[in-house]
Image (spheres, grey):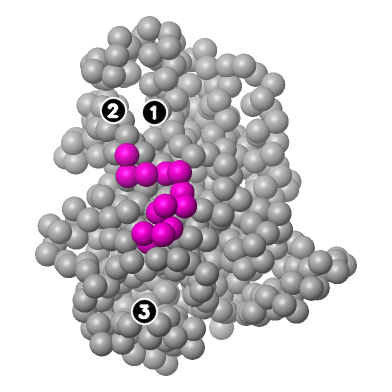
Amino acid sequence: MIVSEKIKSMLESVPYLKEVADTKRVFLSNTSKPNFKEADQRTKFTKQDIRDAEDRLARFAPYIMEAFPETVEAKGLIESKLSSIDEIKDELESYYQTKIDGHLWLKRDDLLPIAGTIKARGAIYEVLKHAEALALEQGMLSSETDDYTKFASQAFKDFFSNYRIVVGTTGNLGISVGVMGAKLGFEVTVHMSVEAKEWKKNLLRSRGVKVVEHETNFTQAVQMGRSQSLQDETSYFIDDEFSEELFLGYTVAGNRLQEQLSQMDIQVDEDHPLFVYLPCGIGGSPGGITFGLKQVYGDNVHCFFAEPTQMPSMLIGLMTKEYDQVSIEDFNIDGSLTNMDGLAVPRTSGFVAKLMHDFFDGGYTVSEKDNFTFLRKLVDIKEIALEPAAVVGVTGPARLFSSVQGQAYIKEKGLENKMKEANHISWATGGSMVPEADRRAFYNAVEQYL
């Protein structure tokens, strides 16, 4: 592919962009980010928006408990635990030849009820909000104070069977939308790209979801899904690229993590910084979680987005300030070489990327070898089996301490003498629903890079 003059100019003028385009491992800080107070004044989203999302999920909790008994113990809350992974620290330090200060944690979104993926919060939230709007509009619900267990009734399922939900995905968003949408009674169609794993397609079909496969990438699969949905007035399209509802569904993770950390007596303040490393594909889930965390902890939480070296779409969009107007393909990056299918998105969300320019603290890229190395180590040391896309955050603390940019970030923020009191949370995406044969394949995949 011929590189345009515009792209050539970017490669020459944007610091570190050539390294990213050459698929080298990088760790970069967001030098244009203002402090939280200023950033918060630039966005239309507020804490009230997050409260509205939390209230809606609370209204649906009785229904969720009835429809998904596995959520009864958590009272209908779709949330995951924190697991200590301090045992991985020695391996990270040895591999990256560095010293890591602070405690390491894994946010277990691979164990989220209903869908077992980071996408569950946002996707399930948007499906429920759409269902609520239809039910109120058509008189199936009298008000928001009505009994929401009605949603589990046959009458409601028959009602929703007249409506369709359509989504385009690499896999995990489709699982979350498909499982909840089908449970409510919607006819759900999931458009999936070639990068999506076969087991995810099979899982969806087993839940009564229609899967449409496209011999193309994620962006084009989304476009095809959007186009199909627009032709049907009974159809609702969940748009991974532009949905504000998805974004707001993810934001509830901020307050929930605060409560979780408080229960564990883990402080987060100026002297006890919190670092969070989030897997990034299109950007909705890491963006929403970051926004929610910033609303809680402000400048005391430091959020970094992790991407495959072969699929750095968010980094490229932010570095060039072209957002969704530029793709990895413009830089001749072969995205088919990544096995992290959940992050296989060649073009970022313009909506999320523009917002994140004021909120996220930086990003880094992870090679296939590094990722599969620590996928195996998590199994060997902690007996935690994640899918490849879920592992990219695990190397974040080592990348922070081992890179020039990471050390510069710590110094710039005045954290040199506070890192021993830091907590590092690597946010997992999925893994609990992966079939055993695929788990074995993931475990052995590192051997092809040795």
Quadrant into which the C terminus falls:
bottom right
Q: Which mark is residue 60?
A: 2
Three-letter amino acid code at disc 1? Leu
Please tell me which of labels 2 and 1 falls first in the chain. 2
The numbered dot on residue 413 is: 3
Q: Residue 366: x and y, percent?
A: 53, 73
Classified by dominant secondary structure, the portion drawn in magenta counts as helix
User: What's the magenta region?
Assistant: 36-48
Can residue 63 be spotted in the picture?
yes
Q: Are marks 3 and 1 in contact (CB under 8 Å)?
A: no
Identify the secondary structure beneath mark 3: loop
> For residue 264, which numbered disc appears in the image?
none
Residue at left offset 54%, top offset 34%: 238
Q: Which residue is mark 1?
A: 128
Mark found first going from the N terminus, 3 or 2: 2
| Residue under the point 24% across and 73% down | 270
Which residue is more in the foreground, 301 or 224?
A: 301
Q: Is residue 15 above or below residue 227?
A: below
Residue at the farthest bottom position: 97
Q: Quadrant of residue 386?
A: bottom left
- Element type where label 1 sits in the image: helix
Q: Amino acid at mark 2?
A: Phe
Above or below, comparing residue 153 to residue 196 in the picture? above
Do we see residue 203 in this rendering? no
x%, y% of residue 317?
63, 61
Q: If the image is split into quadrants, where does the N terminus sit?
A: bottom right
Please determine whether, in this image, residue 9 is positioned above or below residue 435: below
